[in-house]
Amino acid sequence: MLGLVAFIMLSPQAREHVFEKWAGIQEYVQLAAAPYHLYPIETTYTLGKSIDYYNSAGNSYATESLAIPTDVSSLYEQNSSFVYTDGVTPNATPESIQIINSIEVIINDAEKIPIPLNGIPSKSFDDKITTSNGHTVWWPGVGPGINDCKIGNCVRFNLSLSPGESARVTFAVNLTSTSYSWWSSTRVDSRIAGYEDGINVDRSGTFDDISERGGGSKLIQFGAKQWYNRGSMIGEDGPYQNYAIDAIQFDIVQETADTISASIPEGRSDNAYAFARATFDYLHKNVAYDKEAPVVARSGPACLAASIGDCDEQTNAFFSILRTKGIPGWYVFGALTDSTFQTWEGHAWGYILLPMSDSWCISQNIELDSCFVEGSVDVVNNKWLLHTPTAFIDWIEEADPSGNLVKAYYQPGVRCCDVERQRSFSTLEFQEGTGGTFQIKKLAENLR
């Protein structure tokens, strides 16, 4: 009783301090018992993306494009991250998180065709390679023609299939992938690169700061309230299907955003990090994973309405909510495996931009325009501002007002008549990882 009286007599600031200390103790205890995922720090392996075709009837064909994966750094396609203003500290250099070592196309598990890194030099359709079965392979570069690539450099192939004939095309990519964190937290293993320069709720800027970082380009490119129109559709979960990302058309998105905002501690209502992280934790708690998701991915509103969704759909929901506050997010496509690299599946997740606060940037002598992070967020796999070697990055969405690039990724080819197609992933070669493994606990963050 005396303790309660003493607590009541404390100033509001002192009581808040006690609450924070107690919340920290609670979080520490909860972390000890929380479930976790195990990830390697760095691994080199060969991923096989195989596509099996079977022609069950008359003469048919199949044409397809495979995106050529590229090296990826902690600040994609940028030569520097933080730019320092003190005249002494060198500008921060982005670190590699994915390095492509070699690529080859394997036809029917026999004929191997080496592909140059980044598809350079290119090979035009007129200079295509013809296999012993009469199939053709080329890597033409981006262009407007029917035989060119659409979303970036790619490998294209054309299969001519007689009745009853089958073919397998395997895209074998050898890569080195390294874990990286854009989150500055004691919950991040100290062996993981990036966390020291990462963001957290105390370092975060506001929603208004987003337009003042990186020239505001990501907000312009990936901040539209509605994005990727698949056409008008009425799906099994209601009329929510046209825009994959939709922050304004359906009340459920704004209502969810309001619920999330109400959960954020006082004084952090305009904190960009707090809202993004609270959205991440909200989806974990309220949206189940769908192992039998529809062929056409649910939109963000449809995912929220159904309270269920796969990786594409929960990413749509995440981005729909974030865009109510002007936080830009863009897609990443690839494949995901387990900690033993035995089981793979196609996967989609996202990147988001979060600004550091003016005060933190100034205290670190960092130019405001460069003072932000662009980090990977995988909602369904509990990876907050984290890249792990278990995620293979095939293609990162590029700015495109038409949305045709995303559509082209989802629809990489055409087939005639009765050709059946099935895609699978496997580990063709695995080298022991370096640096050991680390745990990521599944527990909502205390944002006080």
Image (cartoon, grey):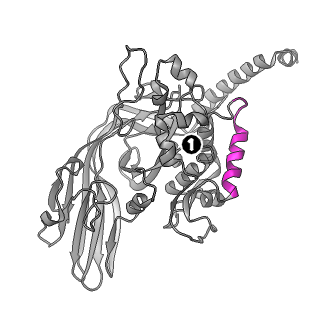
Q: Assign a secondary structure to mark 1.
A: loop
Would you say residue 262 sits in the magenta stretch?
A: yes
Residue 419, x across and y down, in percent = 31, 77
Q: Left or right: where does residue 371 sit relative to residue 226?
A: left
Front residue of 196/399: it is 399
Q: Which residue lies under the disc numbered 1?
A: 327
Residue 381 visible in image:
no
- Does 77 appear above or below 337? above
**Where's residue 398, x and y in %?**
40, 50
Horizontal side of 409 relative to 215 (left or right) equals left
Q: Main secondary structure of the magenta part?
A: helix
Residue at 28%, 53% in the rendered image: 68
As drawn, 41 above or below 1: below
Which residue is at the far bottom? 58
Looking at the rendering, the stretch of residues picked out in magenta corresponds to 251-267
Q: Is residue 237 left or right of residue 81?
A: right
* Label 1 neighbour load within 10 Å: few <14, some 14-19, many 20+: many
Does 133 lie within the magenta span?
A: no
Residue 79, position in %: x, y?
33, 32
Going by the numbered disc 1, the residue's amino acid type is Ile
Total numbered circles: 1
Q: Is residue 137 left or right of residue 248?
A: left
